[in-house]
Image: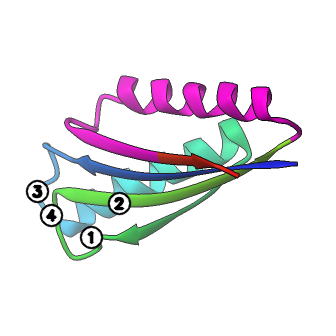
Amino acid sequence: MTVVCLQITAYLAHSSSLKDKRSAVKRLCAQLRREYGASVCEDGLQDNRQWMQLGMAMACADMPTAQRMMQRVEMHLYEEPVLSRQEIKSEIY
């Protein structure tokens, strides 16, 4: 079994309040859970209205599947219109 861990830090350009940010983060977390079966949580920058930090983990059967899933998640995040600038750190165990 292989585990993929990602830490996502992103800028929410159109977020004008913490309420806007929470709504966007909640929607993104639910989408990642639904589409990839991942565990996702907001793990930092919670009091900043325009920056978010998410932690994400997925279990995969083998290394090739883990790498493929990681690439799919990264592409999904880069295509997300709500996120302007982002940094994604990833590790596979």
Instruction: Classify residue 36 by image quadrant.
Output: top right
- The x, y position of residue 90, in whole percent, is 50, 46
Which sits earlier in the primary sequence, circle 2 or circle 4? 4
Instruction: For marks 1 and 4, give the one nearer the viewer.
Output: 1
Distance from label 4 to label 3 (Cα)?
4 Å
Distance from label 2 to label 4 (Cα)?
16 Å
Instruction: For marks 2 and 4, give the one nearer the viewer.
Output: 2
Give the residue number, with chain letter if any, for mark 1: 45
| Towards the viewer: 3 or 37 | 3
Give the residue number, with chain letter if any, for mark 2: 53
Please, what is the three-letter code of the amino acid marked with disc 2?
Gln
In the picture, measured across the screen, residue 6 lies left or right of residue 57, that is: left
Which sits earlier in the primary sequence, circle 2 or circle 1? 1
Question: Please, is residue 83 above or below residue 39 in the view?
Answer: above
Distance from label 1 to label 4 (Cα)?
14 Å
Determine the residue positioned at 47% across, 49% down: 27
**Is disc 1 surrounded by few (<14), some (14 to 19) or many (20+) residues within 10 Å?**
few
Which sits earlier in the primary sequence, circle 1 or circle 4? 4
**Is disc 4 surrounded by few (<14), some (14 to 19) or many (20+) residues within 10 Å?**
few
Q: Secondary structure at mark 1?
A: loop
Mark 4 in CB contact with mark 3 (< 8 angstroms): yes
Instruction: For marks 2 and 3, give the one nearer the viewer.
Output: 2
Please, what is the three-letter code of the amino acid marked with disc 4?
Ser
Give, as a single range, the part of the protein colored magenta.
61-89
